Amino acid sequence: MDIHTHIPVLLNPFVDALCIDRDGHYVDTTFGRGGHARALLSRLSDKGRLLALDRDPQAIAEGERLAADDARFCIRHWSFADLGEALDEVGWCNINGIGFDLGVSSPQLDDASRGFAFGKDGPLDMRMDTSGGKTLAERLQHVGERELARILREYGDERYSGRIARAILRARDESKLMRTSELENVCFHAAPRQARYGRTHPATRTFQALRIWVNDEMGQLEAGIKGAMDRLASGGRLAVISFHSGEDRRVRDLIEARVHPCTCPPQFPVCVCGKTPDMRWVQKKPLRSSEDECNRNPRSRTARLRIAEKLQ
Ligand SMILES: C[S@@+](CC[C@H](N)C(=O)[O-])C[C@H]1O[C@@H](n2cnc3c(N)ncnc32)[C@H](O)[C@@H]1O
């Protein structure tokens, strides 16, 4: 695949969910290579506006080319965790739809120099924002075994988190861990023999977990989704595509806390906490990609789309 391409996942359901007013103001918080953004723009009138964000300077460069051609579109190098500040900067208040397409883009995964993927040798970097922050190699210098095992378990659902964490730190201490190929090799040999040749490579979950850690993806997600729900106009839509179960559960819980915010014990006959819903589910059970889409784009296999609407 050309390293500059990204096939947008769940394209029509995502755009259908968001785009409820042709003249509205929308935010694509994860521009990537602009597949969703271009489809959104194709549904907007001359009055409609789209702001896009991304943490990755390469995505911003691509977005700036689009902005030069389309006056309805602008892009900013902001994290979606700072959505409120980005909206204040452009002076927008009532947003009709905010979309998140979480995780990494194909160009990020396919570019070995970014260090996101195994099977391609590169430096241990994994930062989405290459303009700042600590690389994976730098973070690994200061992490302890228990903490690393927790990261692998929590963010990667890794069964062998303890043995893999121990092996990673041993390789680090022997200065044998500088490249993604070395990390892949450490994971392979740390996994028990029977787990080495299964359907998924033994390094898959570790790479996912370390990427989530390096980019503080769960913290960013929480701030981003809460910020989005705060800034939607009445009737405005939130659409979120996630790619692994931990991420999807967090998205569900963050929205659910606004759909059913009452904290009164169930035996209370009436609510006394006074917390009222300000969101409703449009699509609580996540939408999945069709078999056809999964065949055309294997990265869509784990995608889940949840949709909610602002009430007041
Ligand atoms: C799956 S890709 C999006 C692809 C895009 N929808 C398209 O059609 O081309 C995810 C993008 O989100 C960006 N990203 C991840 N976390 C982010 C964050 N906290 N703030 C802003 N962008 C983020 C990544 O850099 C990546 O470009």
Image: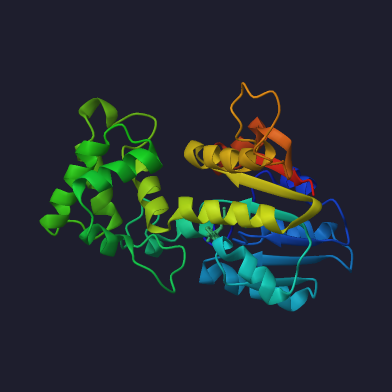
Q: Residue at x 25, y 25 (%)?
A: 194
Outermost residue, bottom direction? 68
> Where does the image place residue 68, in percent across and percent down from the top left?
73, 78
> Where does the image place residue 186, in percent across and percent down from the top left?
21, 45
| Residue 180 vertical position relative to residue 165 in the rendered view, above or below | below
Residue 257 shown left or right of residue 199 in the figure: right
Residue 225 in view in this figure: yes
Residue 302 shown left or right of residue 52 in the figure: left
Quadrant of ligand 1 in image: bottom right
| Front one among 238 and 289 | 238
What's the coloring here?
rainbow
Q: Quadrant of residue 42?
A: bottom right
Q: Residue at x 34, y 37 (%)?
A: 201
| Front one among 6 and 221 | 221
> Where does the image place residue 102, in percent across and percent down from the top left?
56, 51
Residue 138 shown left or right of residue 238 in the figure: left
Q: Quadrant of residue 112?
A: bottom left
Q: How many marks?
A: 0
> Where does the image place residue 32, in percent across and percent down from the top left?
59, 61
Q: Residue at x 20, y 46 (%)?
A: 145
Residue 203 in view in this figure: no
Outermost residue, top direction? 267
| Front one among 193 and 304 | 304
